[in-house]
Image: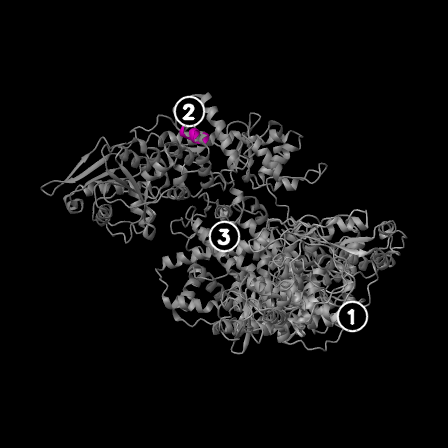
Amino acid sequence: MSDEKIVCFVCKKSDEHIIIFSEETLKKCQTILKLRKIHNLKYRDIILPSEYTESGYHRVCYKVFTGLMKKYFTSQPLSAEKKKGKKQGSCVITSNSSSTLSSIRDLSSELPDPQSPSTESSSQLISLSQSTETQPSTSENESHLQSVSTESPTTSQPAPICESIDLQSATLQDISDVFEPEVSDNNFVSQDVNISTDNIAGKNDNEVVCIFCNKKKKKVRSRMLPLHAADVQQFKDSVKPNIESHKEFTDFSNKLDNFSGSKIYYHTECRVDFNNKLSSLKATPSKKEWHYHREYHQTVFNEISTIIKEDVIKKGRCFLLVYLHESYIDLLEKIFQENSIQMTATFTAHHLEEKILKVFSKDIKFFTVRNKKILAPKYLEAIDDSVLDNLQQENILRKSALILRKIILQIEKIKLPTKNITSQHLISGEVSIPEELSDFYSTLLGGCNQKRKTGQKCSRLVRSYCQDVIFGVHDGRVKTSKHIMLDTTDEPEMSEVSSENTSPNKKRRRRTFDEINIDEMPYPKKPKMTSELQLSVDDIECIDSQINTEIDNIWMISHALELPDVPMWVGFNSRIDDQDSPQQHISYLTPINASPTSTSIVLETMKQSQKIAEDLQQPYIQVTYDLAIAKVALQIQATENPTFDNLFIHLGPFHIMMAYFKAIGKVISDCGLTTVMVESSLLANGSVNGFLDGKHFNRCKRLHPLVALGLEILHFKSFLQNDNITLTEDIIDEVKRLQNCKISLFEIENDGLKELMNNYGIYKQQTLNGEHGKTSQFYLIYINLIHHYLDLSRSIRTGNFQLFKSVLPKITSIFFVLNQQNYARWSVKYYDSLLRVDKTHPDLYEGFLKGCFGIKRTTKPFSRQPIDLVLEQTINAEAARRLTGVIHFTNSISARQRWARNHDVRSTIISQVYLELGLQKHQDISTDLNPHNIRKNAKQLQQFVATFDQFINPFSLEVPKDQLVNISSGKSASLPVEEFLLNLEANGDSLRRTFISECQSDITRFEKAIKKTSINNFSKDYEKKKIKVGGKIQEVKIQRDLFGRMLGISMDYSIDISKILSYPITSVPLSMCHLDGTICKTDKSALMKCLEKEVEHEEPSQIDILIIDGFFLLHTMKNVPRKFGGISKKMLQMVTQLKASRIDVIFDQYFTPSIKGYERSMRFESAQLEYTIAGPEQVRPSDFVKELKNSNFKEALVDFFILHWASDEMAPFIGNKIIHINFRKCHSFTVNEANKVMSSINEELSCPEHEEADNKIVYHACKINYEANIVIRTVDTDVAAIMLSHMHRLNDGSHVWMLTGAGNNLRYVDLTKIHAKLGESICRSLPGLHAFTGCDYNPAFYRKAKLKPYKLLKKYVEFQLAFMKFGDSKIIENNNEQVLIFDIIQSFICYLYNMNDINDVDAARLQMFINSYTVSDVNEAFNRKKLQNFDASCLPPCKSELLQQFLRANYICSIWNNAHLQKPTAYKPVNNGWILENDHYYFKWFEGDQLPNYVSESLKTVPENNEEGDIEDDQSTEWNNSDEEYGCIDDDDENDENV
């Protein structure tokens, strides 16, 4: 279509309201034009278009043009009408048989002769009243039409127009109803029907009303309906035969029978409704084929109409006509196909265009661009080529969708079998994915990137999307693999034996499984180990493990350098492993309902194994047992020799690992390593027991390698520091290259790295020999023990049988020395069998060399696992799962057997579901390569290494070489402990060799008892605590589970648990310190960060006074000069670096005794020797940093600074500044006019009774009585808290900043701004909060940190007021005031532990204990074991313990709050939370009894150790409800995808 604007044929105007002609409307206008020309009427000269698409019309114009009076439709022309006179009244003619519209249609084809006279119709006329009332019009262009009802007998001729009709009474609206019903808006004007009753009264006395509705007047769509008259008999004859058979019309039939009038009147609308109702009751006539075709076309057109209404008319979108036509044909074909009808007729785009225009011509229009028709909204003026291009692209997409839809609908469907259905049937589904659909989604997701398109993630998504689309296109009638799996994962019914329930009341089919019973034959003999060991003392399998050592070293160095994207040990090895071994499948035998360690049952399993070997036609078979079953099997095999010689019996490596973890736990028990792990958040306090006992397998296998790695990093850094080695860029690049180098190509090419590795190996051997100290030696021994585990794991994961045999004797030696007698004995036998397997079971030996002594369930490299671990990870884990495990919902052995028999099918289905969804049911080795896990593990490792800054670095040069020290407490181990721990492997190997030699000389020696050795670990030196019970002093050895044991003993007396928990129970509060007495610490800087976030900070424009923490500045000194004179000059240079007119340098004093003694002891100040500095030329100690931890050296160094800075050579450095040094006294230094240094003592600034530099700094600030910009250079949070509480004492114009941090993190913190933002109340309460929640002198609450206490302080004014009173003499001296404040502090602690509704700490302890130690049944037996492992560190301290913490915080605040005074406090630490013993202050943890007095006798029976051997390790793995036994084993390394 051209782009010319379409104009109205009447007004010749063009706008958006133009309606295009349809064929019908154009034909009507042509007919009207002929009439207008005949009667010489207005608009007779209008020219109509020849084609209906060439012009249009306005709605109003159309009505005006077609609005002719009825008289012009007769055969008489206007000249004949004028000859007739007008008569009074008016009438309307109606006809039953023909309508005006039919007359018009006749006119359109053949117009009557204009001169022919009108023929009088047979229609009856009804006279109207002579006076006609005209109702007021509701429209300016319309008047009311006065109507009459007529009886209209059937006639074929047009009805004559009565001469009494007023030509002006017809409205334009009336005419438009006749000629254009499609465009009418039905806005008619209401009219009253006036019926002349003269003639009616003369004929019938009945009331003139409608026979159907009994109404005279009726209004429909705002128009008054006329009454029509009909002959009574004719009406009855036409109606009665149709209603006789319908009861619904009985009343109406009686009404007709009783009707006595001569005429029957009715409304046309009522007559039509009556006919419609009658038609609906009649039987529906049978439809022909064209009826159905018409309905189908209408249905499809309705769909297209919806698109036009929603998208074109409402949203203004455009569509290609060809697209709408294709959609029309597609929908039509689908309907014809669904109804099994052949579609033969052709429906063209032109046909669709006509239908659309007929319905939507007033709202849409068509454009033609490049021979393409475009459907657009009416208001759109033009369409350019870009719109067409976009539409064509959309059309391509829609065509693609229709093509794919057609392909999907034509997919061949394969019905699932109704019988013998397998898991493979379910996985395959009913249809396969068409290649075209798969390619479409691959391209959609991956584009042209072939690597992405073939990637695992993309393939998984494509497969999932394709199946969803197939399912959706078929409306769920075709099920794909994915949707079948989602429907059947709950519990597929795959029973072996089924029977129907014969109950007549139930139709449901019931499936049952008959129990499989084993005929248990008692074993008549007592099995013994009668076979002789073939093993000799020197039979040790040695292999070259250099490449493994290099790989582990590269892994360690990568973490030491903090290189990015370095995973943990398993992930690192899986990344470089390139060995390809076949994947294995797992099936399960039927469980036997009997004790697995029973001799007869073990014998039955051995027979079943032989039967399996026979069925598989294999001469040999390997069987894996845990220790308790394996020793019975080995005894039977020896007793029944040679019956079971074709069995090779494995000792389960997984159980060996667990026993080994328990042995390592004994080595590191109470050495301080677990304390560091807890403080670094690697391990929860309540998990220490399970970790050390080896019962939490996953925790052990994750944390031991991580801890060993952290320690080896510290050792490697000490090596670099000791040899002054700096790693070059070449070495670092080589390390990066080797991170991703496959094992087959793994070779160090950089000579520098080779030399580094060689030197580090020598250094490690020196450390193992004790050349770098006993502490270093012990922790490197621990690292080596962990490497034995890693070698065992590597041997199984890579299938390296030689490595497996070489590491087993090393582990066995540890079993001997640490009293794991059963594992020690039977590991020797197992090793003996492994050495001879090439001769006893040659076929199995070939399999062992290929790695077939483990199971590989995935395609992932480095993923092979021990056989017994796989059993625990699969069926045993599934059975014991709390929510879905079979043992939790049934005790029926038949149900459990059925569950086990179906486990492989069920696991296959479930694994397939997770695979389809792109999820992992179980973790595998690829989890370690997950970027999130890499970052998480690296962060934990760095945090663990950094925590050693708070404790003792075992490889530090500061640690005395001749002592083995506890790295958390700093205490030295006794000589027996040193001898035992430092000779662990040598002693173990000696015991193993002795046992082997004894067995060779005496065959009966093998099963005789192995004598236990004395385990002299750090726990042996553990100090016994004196406790007071019932007034008696007793000693109890502190152990990890002491709280649970003591609580359990107390509960045995049936005493109220609330009373028991009100006692401390342990000698040290576990909520505030560790069992070794080391206090819990917190990151003090967290409070500083909270304060910094309160305001925006800006640097000072100038600095008037600078106050420096002297020892802090001294520790930041780099490149320390060789002589003390140089150190003094450099120190003064650093002091005067910032431009300030006055600089105060503040140093700590060292009092004895001091409450800071504990904090200083943690610095490992081992050698507190007297030190003298003779002059500036004296050479400093070689280890200057180490000497800075010697208080005597620091005092001598400050005294030297005071003397040296007074010399004239320091005048250039001092210049015009005033320098103060505050040590014992405050010394001032200035330079006079003669350039001489003047030194004096400033008594006003001297504060000799202040010990800490923190208080002295605040004292100096408070003594500034004039306006000044004050900057404090320190990093101590204590200073910020104390200074904020003293801001009200400063001059009003003074401004205080704190210069904190170092290097790139150096920043100014505006304390004045913070004080203004927080307000006086919060600032003055900060010292109390800080002292109470943990500082250098007071322990912190376990894992409560500073953030939450600070938030509570800000939120509650009550807590602010309480902490403000800390340090007040009234609290210390007035007991009533103390109780009042202490009650508020109790409430604060309850809030801190989330017990907001409780105000008493003892009640809070009880509630938290109840919440933790929950029972499922009130009648449940008391679980002593569960209680023994209870983590008491999560409970708040009891009231007695909290009171001492409260008193200590009060005493500390008495010093801090009086920092502005020369004598801060007159009180002493004794009786304020400390006790004085041997001239040292120690924490006083509580006052009164530790336990109730009735426990005193029971304490004597409490065992002090748990050295009962490895009985627990010998127990078999059964399905039980407890996950304590094996530590919540999960699939940490495997994906259960092929079970």
Task: Pick whichever of labels 2 and 1 is earlier in the sequence.
Answer: 1
Which mark is first along the chain, 1 or 3? 1
Q: Residue furthest left?
A: 1234
- In terms of depth relative to the viewer, which is nearer, 67 or 574? 67
Viewer-nearest of discs 2 and 1: 2
Mark-to-mark CA distance, 3 and 1: 52 Å
- In front of the other: 55 or 1146: 55
The secondary structure type at the circle numbered 1 is: helix
Name the spot of residue 560 as percent of width and height, x first: 43, 59
Disc number at residue 982? 3
Q: Which residue is mark 2?
A: 1372
Q: In the image, what residue type sits under mark 1?
A: Glu
x 50%, y 37%: residue: 1392
Pointer 1 residue: 614
- Packing grade of label 2 (10 A; few <14, some 14-19, many >=20) is some
Q: CA distance from mark 2 to mark 1?
A: 87 Å
Frontmost of labels 2 and 3 is 2
Label 1 Cα crowd, 10 Å radius (few <14 / some 14-19 / many 20+):
few
Q: Position of residue 1001 (x, y in %)?
A: 66, 60
Determine if the magenta segment contains residue 1362: yes
Q: Which residues are magenta?
A: 1358-1364
Main SS class of the magenta portion in the image: helix
Task: Indicate which disc, 2 or 3, sits on the residue closer to the N terminus.
Answer: 3
Q: Mark 3 Cα within 10 Å, few/some/many (few <14, many 20+)? A: many
- Would you identify the image quadrant in which residue 756 lies? bottom left
| Callout 2 amino acid | Ile
The numbered mark at residue 433 is none
Q: Are marks 3 and 1 in contact (CB under 8 Å)?
A: no
